[in-house]
Amino acid sequence: MPVERDRLVGDRLSLESRMKSIWPRFGITGFNVRRKDAPARLEALRDRQGQPLPPNTQNELRRLLARHVLIESHIREIEAARDAALAGQPDAVATLDDEMRKMILLLVRIPGIAAETATILVVECLARHFPNARALGGYAGLTGTPFSSGGSQRDQGLSKGGNPRLRKCLVQLAWRWQRLLPDHALSLWFRERTGGAAKGRIRKVMIIAMARKLLILLWKLATTGVIPQGLRLKDA
């Protein structure tokens, strides 16, 4: 279910990019294709001279917007099925077993982790067995590739292996974690090692390291149920 949703979200973004590439040609700004009344507003669009858009352009936009509306409905359908499974509704499609459901419901109590993120983390990783934290990080593709030549040893950076969907989810979560939990130990650890730099390579390197630490923290929470020190959960 998370894989299909990711593909649909990608298709939605592709359609939005195509429509956004059309607006500047006619001086159109501020048109939100995700509004419910977007189809009706499309008919009222005018170019910078106040004239209706050319028929070919109008027809192209109608087709793109119709596909966008269809994809949105499919995404909502998948999200509704996920929410029904999490709520334990008897008529819900059995996409999650009881253990997965418990893990997801626990993770969504953490600020910054919504149902979709929690589902990806559990289905893609946390519901699996890992012998240790290094194996966990390797599965997510968050461990470095060692390089040895003569007497020197160094890290070549991230390997190309691992689960790319899980890695992307964790990196995005790591950025949100700093914003929503600025006083947590992981956020303080990141700021200390980046020296408050607004951008640059060091931030990219350290966000990967933080994502790995965050994965281990969530793994221990999901598998043991023990709340890590300094982490306050929302009420169930």
Image (cartoon, rainbow, N blue to C red):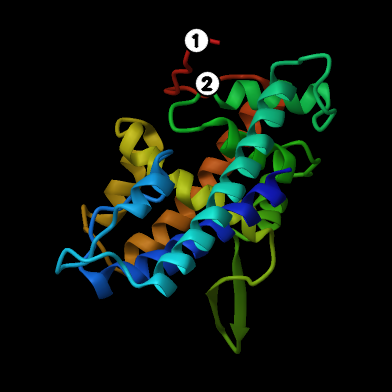
| Residue appearing at x 53%, y 56% in the figure | 12
Q: Residue at x 62, y 53 (%)?
A: 8
Q: Amino acid at mark 1?
A: Asp
**Image location of residue 203, percent across then percent down:** 33, 60
* Nearer the observer, 178 or 98: 98
**Is 203 in front, or is 109?**
109
Q: Quadrant of the N terminus?
A: top right
Is 126 drawn above or below residue 159 in the view shown? Answer: above
Residue at mark 2 to residue at mark 1: CA–CA distance: 7 Å
The quarter of the displayed image where residue 45 is located: bottom left
Marks 1 and 2: in contact by CB < 8 Å?
A: yes
Task: Locate residue 55, reporting x and y percent.
Answer: 40, 71
Of labels 2 and 1, earlier in sequence is 2
Find disc 2 in the rendering and name its residue. Answer: 109
Which residue position holds label 1?
A: 235
The secondary element bearing badge 1 is classed as loop
Estimate the x, y position of residue 226 in percent, counting from the top left: 61, 19
Q: Nearer the viewer, residue 205 or 36?
A: 36
- Is 95 left, or right, of 185 in this rendering? right
- Residue lying at the far left in this picture: please name it: 49
- Extreme residue in the top direction: 235
